[in-house]
Every structure is written in C-alpha cells, then in structure tokens.
Image (cartoon, grey):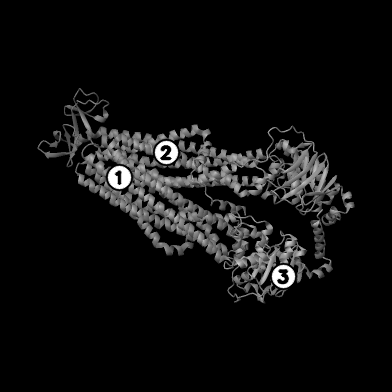
Amino acid sequence: MKSFWLLKDFFRANVWRYALGVLWLIIVNSAQLVIPYLLGYITDQVETGQATTADLWSFAGYIMVIAAVIVASRYLWRIYIMGTARKLEFHLRDMLFSHLQKLSANFYNEHKTGDLMAHATNDVNAVRMALGPGIILLTDAIFLTVATVIIMSQTIDIRLTALALLPLPFMAVLVMFAGRIIHLRFKAVQAAFSNMTDRVQENLSGIRIIKTFVQEDTEAKKFDEVARSLIFRNMDLVRVWGLFMPLVQFISGLSYLIVLAYGGILVIEGTITLGAFVAFNTYLAMLIWPMMALGWVINVLQRGASSMERLKVLLETEPEVVDRPDVKEVNRLKGDLEIRNLDFSYPDGTAVLEDININLPRGNTLAIIGRTGSGKSTLANLLLRLYDPPSGRIFIDGIDINLIPLEVLRRDIGYVPQDLFLFSTTLHENIAFADENFSRKQVEEAAKLAQIYDNIVEFPQKFDTLSGERGVTLSGGQKQRMTIARALIKNPALLILDDCLSAVDTETEEKILKGLRRFMTGRSSIIISHRISTVQHADEIVVMDQGRIVEKGTHEELLKADGFYSTLHHKQQLERIIAEDRG
Amino acid sequence: MSETYNYHEEEALGKSYDGRLMKRLLSYARPYWLIILTCIILLLVVTATELARPYLIKIAIDDYITPGPLLVWESGNEPQEGIKYGEQIYIHRHRLSEDYPDQPKAQLFTYEGGFYLVDGYIEDINYSVRREEKGLIINTEVGLFTASPLEAEDYRAFRQPDKTALVQLALIYLGIIALGFSLNYLQIYLLHRTGQQIIFNIRHQVFSHLQRLSLRFFDTNPVGRLVTRVTNDTETLDQMFTGVVVYLFKDLFMLLGIVIVMLQLNIRLALISFSLIPIVIIATIVFRLKAREAYREVRTRLARINATLAENITGMRTVQIFHRMGEKHQEFNEINHAHYRASFRELKIFAVFRPFIDLIYFLALALLIWYGGGIVIRGLIPFGVLYAFIQYIEMFFRPINDMAEKYNIMQSAMASSERIFQLLDTPVDIQSPKQPLPTNIKGKIEFCNVWFAYNPGEWVLKDVSFTIEKGQTVAFVGATGAGKTSIINLISRLYDIQKGQILIDGVNIKEMDLDQLRKNVAVVLQDVFMFSGTIADNIRLNSDIDDQQIRHIAEAVDAHRFISRLPRNYESEVKERGATMSAGQRQLLAFARALAFKPKILILDEATANIDTETEQVIQKAMKTISRGRTTLVVAHRLSTIQSADKIIVMHKGKVREMGSHQQLLARGGYYYNLYQLQYKEQETG
C-alpha cells in the first residue's frame, strides 16, 4: 500500500474531490436508509387503517423528496469519485510516459515493448479500479453495513437482526476466499492463453517450414490440443466462478428465510409490527450488496496495490544518462572532436572499444570502416551519450563530452542511425522532427539533399502523406533517405552517418555524398560504413577491427598499405563489376 | 514493430450491430441448439425461483401474519382437527381444502394491547371500535360485530397453526432457493462449456484456414496481427456468447415474468406500474445512442494512446537523439487528455442515465404507494399484494441498469467478428487441383520460360528455362537478389508463377496433388527454423517416425555426435528457437529433418554464417550422404559444393546467365569467372 505514496501530489491536489465524493456517497446511503423506514411506517399506517388519502399523497411526496436527494447525490458521487479516478489514470499515465522518456538506451535493451505496454495499460487500469470503484465499494461496505445493522437492531429487534445476519459473514468470507481461488484459476487461464498465443506465434513464424513439410494438418491438431487445454482451464475457473453468484443468492436467500419464519412469528406474537417486518426485509436487501462488496473490495484493492507496486519499480528506475551537476554552460557546438585513449565496456562487462584515438578538426570528414561488430556504432552511441563514456576521453570543442548539456549535444549533432525508425505522422513532420517550426521550403530542401524529394512528390499527398501502417510503407532505401533528411534539416555542427546508405543504390549514394560535401563545408562529419565507395573521399579513414583502430590514413595511403582496407577495396571492385554486368 | 500493429487497428472499430454478422456468428451456435435450449429452459426455471420470494412473502403476510378468517363448527361436526374454544371448533381457512362458504366465520383481533375474538369476519378495513363491558363492539359498513376478550394463552393457541404454516412456507422457500441454486449453477456450467466449444470451433477454423493461405498472404500480414485474430478476437466472442446472448433471455424472462405475476395479482395496480415503461424505453434508446458514441470515442482514444505509447517506446532512441522529449511528451499529453475528456463524457452519460432510471423507479414506487395504498385502505386488496408489487417493481429495474455493460460487450464482439470473418473470407489461392494427376515423383525438373514476380510488375524471374535430370546435383550461384531463392520457393509451390510452366517428370506441378508434391520436395533453408519441443520432435516434425529411426537418420548426417553430448540427448528441449545451438548444428538438424521425410527432390540453401572447419567438413559429408540418389538443388555458397555439382546454373538479375560445369564456366572467363574470383577463390585455401 505504501507504493500509493508516489501519488501523494495527486492526492494532495484532489483530496477535497475524494472527500466530497465520499460525502455524496454517504448522503445517498443515508437517504436510502430512510426508504425502508418509510415503507415500514406506511405499512403500519395503512394496515391499521389510520392513513387517509391525504396521508398517501404526502407519503408519495416524501418518497419523491428522498428520491431527489438520492438521484442528485448519485450523479455527484459518480462525477466526483469516478471522475477523479479517471483524472488519476490520466495523471499516472503521464507520469509514466515522462519517466520512460528519461530512461536510457540500456533500459530499453532490457525491457520489451510489450512488457512496458502492459504496465501502461493493465497496471494503470488496476490502480484506477482500486482508487475509483474500490473507494466506492469500501465506503458502501463499511457505511451501509454499520448503519443498517445498527438501525435494524435498535429500531426493530436485536434477536431477529442477529439471526438474520448469521449467514452474511459467511458470504463475505466466501467472496474473499472464492476471490482468491478465482484469482489463481484465472492466472492458470491466462497462462494457458499465452501458451496458445505462443503456439500460434511459433506456427505462423515457421509457416514456410510447415508448408514445405506438409505439416498443416498435424499443426492444426497440435493447436487444437493447446486450445482444448485452454477450455479445461476455463472450465476449472467456471466451476468456482460459476458457483459464486448462485451461492451468494442462496446465502442471502437463507437470511430472507430466517426473516420470513422468525420475523413472521414475531409479528404474530405482536413483538414487532407488520411495518417493522416490511422495513426489515427491505433493510436486508440493502445489506446483501455491501456484504458482497466487502469481499470484492479486498480483491480490487489488492490488485491495485500490486499493480502500483510494479509501476513503482518502473517509476523509481534512475535514469542513467543525465546532465551532471557540474555541467558547463555551452550554447552551441562548433564541431572539433577529439578522442583520447578511449576504452569502453558495456554495463554487462563486454569490452567493445579499446584505446581509440581520433582527431577530427572542424570542417573535416572522418570515415570509419570495419566489419559488423567492430565497434563502429558503439562509438557513435558514445558521441551522442546514449551511454555515458568514461570522463576525460571524448572532447568536443575541447570540452569533456560528459559536461556538455545533453540538449545542446543532441541538438547540434545530426545523427542518422542504422535502425530506420519513422513516426506514423506525415513525411513533412518526420523530416521536420527536430523542430516543428521548419518551413515546408526547408523540409523540401533537406529532402532534395537526401535524394528523397522525387519519391515524395510522386505520392498523391506529397509531403502530407502519412508514413507507416495508415499511410505509405516506405522501402528500406527510402526510409534511409528520410532519416538522412531528418538529420540534415537541423544544420548540425557534427553529422554522423551510421551505415545509413546500405540500402541505397550506388548512383544515389554518389549524389547524396556529393550534395553533402557541399552542404557540410565548415562542419564536421563522421561517415560509418562497410562500403569503400562511401568512405573514399573522407579526409581521414579509420579502419576498425574488434574494437581497435587497425589502420588509419587517406584512401590512397590505405590502398598502398595493402592491409584490410585494400583487400576490401579489391573485393568491392569485383562486386561492382558483377553488379554492373548487363549480360 | 509487429507489436505495435495490434494497437493501431483497434482504432477502426466496426459497426456496432450488424444483422448479417450476427446471423453468421449464431450459425456457430446452431450445432449446440439443444444445450442452449436447455440453458434457456433452466434459466426460465431459475427466473421463476427468483420471482417466487416476493410472492411467498405476500402469502405470508396476507394469509398467516395478518390474522385471516376462522371457520366455526359446533364441536363434533368439524371436518378436520381444529382449535377448541368454548363449545366451538375453529379452523383457519388456509388449513381447509374446501371453501365452506356458508359456514360462520370468526376473526382474531388486537386492540390497544388486548386480544379479542370477533364473531364474524371484518372484510372491510373501515371500522370503528367501541369498548363495552363484555368486550368490543366493532362498527363496519356491513354491520356490527362483537369481539370478546381472549386470554394471551388462548390467543397463542389460536395463532399456533399460523406459525406452523409460516415455518412450512419457509421450508418451501428453502426448497425453492436450493433448486434455484443448483439449476443456476448447472445452467452457468453448461452455458460456459458450450461457449468454450463454440469458440474452440471458431479458433480451429481460423487456425486451419491460416495454415492453407499462401506465403504471399503472410508476406503482407504481420504475424502479430494474425495471432490476435486467432486468440484475442475469438476471446471477445466468448464474452458475447456467454455474457450477453443467453442473459438477454434471462432479462426477458425476468421482465415478462414480473409483468405476468403483477397482472395476475392485480390488473389495475399492474397497469399503473406499467404506465412509466414508455419513459424507460425512451430513456434507454436515447442512452444507447449516446453511450455508443461515447464508448466508441473512448475506445478510439485509448487505441490511440496505446499506439502512440508503443510507437514512442520503440522509437525512444530517436526521440532522445533528437532531444524531442518535451514535444513528444506534449503530444502524448494531448492524446492522453483527449482520452480523459472522452472517458469523462462517457462517465457523465452513465452518471445521468443510472440516476435517471432510479428516478423513474422511485416515481413508480410513489405511484404504487399513492394508488396502491389507497385501494388497500379501501379494502380492495390485501396489504401483501401491495408489498409484492413494491418488491417486483424493484426487480423490474435491475436488468435495465445492467444493460449498458452488455451493450459495450456487444460492440467489441461485432468489431472482432468482422475482423475474423474477413480473414476467413480470404480465398486460399494455392490449392490442389480438383482432380490431381496421379503422381509417382522420380525427380526430373524442368523450368520452361518461367516468369515470376512477388509484386505485380516487379519481375524477379524473367523467362527462366532449365532442365535438371533425375538424380543430378545442381548448384545455383549468383549475387544477392539474382533470383536463386525464388526458384526454391517455386518448386514446392509456395508461390505460383505468372507465366510459363514448371514440370516435374513432365507433369505441370499445378496439376499435382499439393501435399504429394511437397512431401516429395524437402527444403533446407539457411536460417533453420526450430520449433519448441525436443530435438527428436524437431527432426520428426509430428510424423510417426520412431526413436530408433531418428537415431539412424541423425547418425547418417553426423548430427548424432553433438546430440549425444546434450544433457538429455534426443529428448533435450530446444530453447529460444535453437539460439543455444550453433549455426552448424542447426544445419545438421535440418538435414536430418529433410532426410526423415525421404524426399525425391532435395533443395538446400547453404548457410552463409561462419561455421568452423570441422563442422564444415561434417556438413559437406552429410550433404553427400543425403543427396545420394536424389535430385538435389543447392543455392551454393561454398566452393566445394559447386565443384562437386553435376551442373552449375549462374543466375543474374532474374535470368539464367550461364550454365555448365565449374571447369567449363571458368574457361569461358565470363560472369562466373568474376563471381568465382570474388566469392569463392578465398575458400580454395581453406
């Protein structure tokens, strides 16, 4: 329950809403309690013949007055309690979102999207249930139980009350106990369900093999097995769950039975009046609900608490990459990069970079070439501080990168990553991602520079075309060029292209690089690639292998060196010949 | 990305109710009509037991609790045992089976704490009482009655039969609730079992249909979405079958039952009670419209939240790299807030509807008290009838309050069923011919001017022709995207070609039985797909090959060696789709899998992944073993494979560029020569 403390700001701001809501609820309940009393009174008046037609008018009037109070308060408690719970849902989701934004790359390597989604949907929902309906159930259960029992025993008959209520605690215990079993069986159902989901997922992922080995029918049989075991788990649940409502009705029926027999005898003996008998029956009907609610409320609160616990773990995960307290005041990067004796290992201990030394003066182009897994992308990640590099190793404009404000660093470095992520917004918005104030003209220019302009204007809605599921599906090459445009529009002081031309044909690549050379005058760029054609014009080329720099120099120097670079060059020459073969 | 797909499509919510969809859905219930009918009958009885309580209380009040008439006989003439008081025998009318209309009556009477016996039955309630020496004189419209005082003891004796009857009534009630309990449970159990059966059948159908669809379908539909069809969408239908359809009957029975009982108790009071029904109906219709709109909006907005959230989580790196947290947060905040507003609107509709229905209920109650109380006073009906009405009217309003929730379930069920049916209606485009030609595949393969495209207009194979004789081993070489893989896909008809013909033993494969064709063509892909299950399961793939044979096969391809080193040998579980095994080991298992099916044609896509020399040699040896006596097509990446092939087919940009043996092609110094220099020369040393 302590985890709810995380929401203290919300509670502080909304405490009066909850208080008012509970107040309305208590008013409804109190007004409801008058009805049986009134019915009893009317019964006695009518039965003994003392009531006149005028009295009946006023009885009906009383009922309508009480009804007005009940109706108005019911409207109000819904708005106050349920409305506040909705507000809480909004607030909690917002908290979660903004916290997720602060967490670094490492966190996302360890947490699956689906898992995080479950937090934001199921857990938030469970917390809302606890703090909305949960509060209502709790108030109802406590207030109605206490008030009804007091009224019944004080105004009617204490023995009858005691006898009639005898079965009801069993009901509360039953609801609680059954609730626990139901919860367990429900978990088993969910397990069977996800088992089935896995089965389907596996089958559909391997559909090719299934088809080539003609396993369709046997796979269907196997699927039937898991689907059938889901039936069994469901029926296990139904066996208990299905017992629940009928049993609750039965137990409340027992209470009615006691009132019918014993209460009736009391009326016959003249101990209580017929009106009291009628009132008692009506009070009893009012008690059954809170008794059931008492069992439920425990489950709802428990579930809410454990969901809040899970959310708390997430919300209290410390972001790894943040501005340090001794951060320097830097407004603009110029683009001088220096890396001195950089070693780097991932948090899990795998060493990725060893003794890296690089000097990239402003306005120059550095190329990094090497096999996959040689550490090229890790280097780029460090320059953007997706992971924090060790101090005193990477300097931009002579300042330790760890002391540069993150905002400035990421604003002034243009990065084109390998993973081609586009948002499902318009193409314009995707290119102008860094700043929504970029004009259409600027967007078009960036698109032209990235050689994607011609593709975009071919779409019927041009730059207003939606990308992704609800719009066009771009090819890998188109996506790469989109991400290039997205980085260029920022006018970065340092541009990093991380192997982002692999899906672009050589001709387009040439055009892009040519345009870039003009565009990047006076600014620095780093081009990461495994293609010679991409890197050959760089001022300096660095060859990486297994986390180390193994060769360094210009294209011509490296060709002469007759090492890794020249072998690669030779191979790629041949590739080119083959590819250009027009047969 | 596939995870995000599910969130997007929720936004497009289908029609709320569609007769055509409903009819098709209910057709799945048809085979179970008998059980469903039983459930409905059970529900009828259960409803009756629920309606019994107010009626029993009415009997208790009118017949037993309120002193009823006593019939009086001279002692000795009584038809059955009665209460002897003075010279007379008094019998409670509720104990007599006959009416005896001419028999004199008496009545017990309580006045100012004293007990009296009246020498007649005061049918009318309007009376006045005058105290006299001997007792009371009661003046009514029909005349004067005298009431003589009774000792408390005598009074108790007179009431004893009432008490006994009350206890008997309670026992009857016990029987009724016990019956209601057991029948209700039975009904719930049967209903859910049937619901599960129906959903199982739908699931089975959806799954089996998916198995029949061609790869082209899977290329365009993300797996995640299809999984949702089979699992979640069907689950929603279960909720509809078990939570709504049958309970609609229950609500209907309840309402009808109440109407009948009320009419039977008192027509005028019943009609008065019903006078408010039109308001309820109008309110319900208005609510339904409003609630539907609001519900859809909430659902749409929630789907948007989820889609945005999923997108932001997937693209968090991009957001952080561009330092757009503030803007993305703002964007999310707006979407989140839009959902809040929508859910608040929905809340308001409920907050108005529920209390409004309450208001009508109280109005009905007030009407009953005003009008019903009036006729009770005038003695036209006993009080118990009024009380029964009060209780029935409360029961009448209950199902109306539950309606909203059921309506929401119906809406999502309709959306789900629409998606399911759409999938079921997707035609199976690659099927066996109606009358397949008898096949006994030997292994000669011919491609005659084959044209093929995955997407219309983008030809992947252009006019490809070649012949492979039975038992030959042919290597396909070429750069990435030359069309090698497509050829593999076509032989087992995973895709159909657009132009030309593919013949096996001179028969067009489109005229063969599809299963027969595929059973005779085994394919080993580069990326070996491993199923969860044991090693043995992964080799035998559901077939009934016994453990002994599996072992022989594994030995033949040299997989036995590494399998026997696993902790549980052939019974070892394959974890994480085989990620714990090396690429070489997976390849060997795939060989074993292919061999187990004794195919006539074998297609191999050689692994490009780094495999150590030792394993490499093992694989080469295994390949020789399994290709013996079989037509073998290899998409080759290894020089040794090419060198030992009977024929090399060089593919380039969807066309056959060169054909011949390794030496012949090298001698030509053409395309193959260059390719050899690039891709295979290095391997010569290895």
Can you see residue B537? no
Residue beneath disc 3: A517
* Label 3 with label 1: CB-CB less than 8 Å: no
Q: Which mark is residue A92?
A: none
Residue A494 as seen in the image, left or right of residue A123 = right
Q: Residues within 10 Å of mark 3 (few under 14, many from 20)?
A: some
Can you see residue B158? yes
Residue A124 as seen in the image, left or right of residue A346 = left
Indicate the amino acid at tag 1.
Answer: Leu
* Label 2 with label 1: CB-CB less than 8 Å: no
Residue beneath disc 1: B365
Q: For marks 3 and 1, give the one nearer the viewer.
A: 3
Label 2 secondary element = helix
* Residue A305 location (% of width, % of height): 48, 56
Label 3 secondary element = helix
Residue B152 as seen in the image, left or right of residue B455 = left
Indicate the amino acid at tag 2.
Answer: Lys
Query: What chain letter is assigned to the residue under label 2?
Result: B
Residue beneath disc 2: B250
* Residue B599 location (% of width, % of height): 76, 39
Query: What chain letter is assigned to the residue under label 3?
Result: A
Query: What chain letter is assigned to the residue under label 1?
Result: B
Indicate the amino acid at tag 3.
Answer: Arg
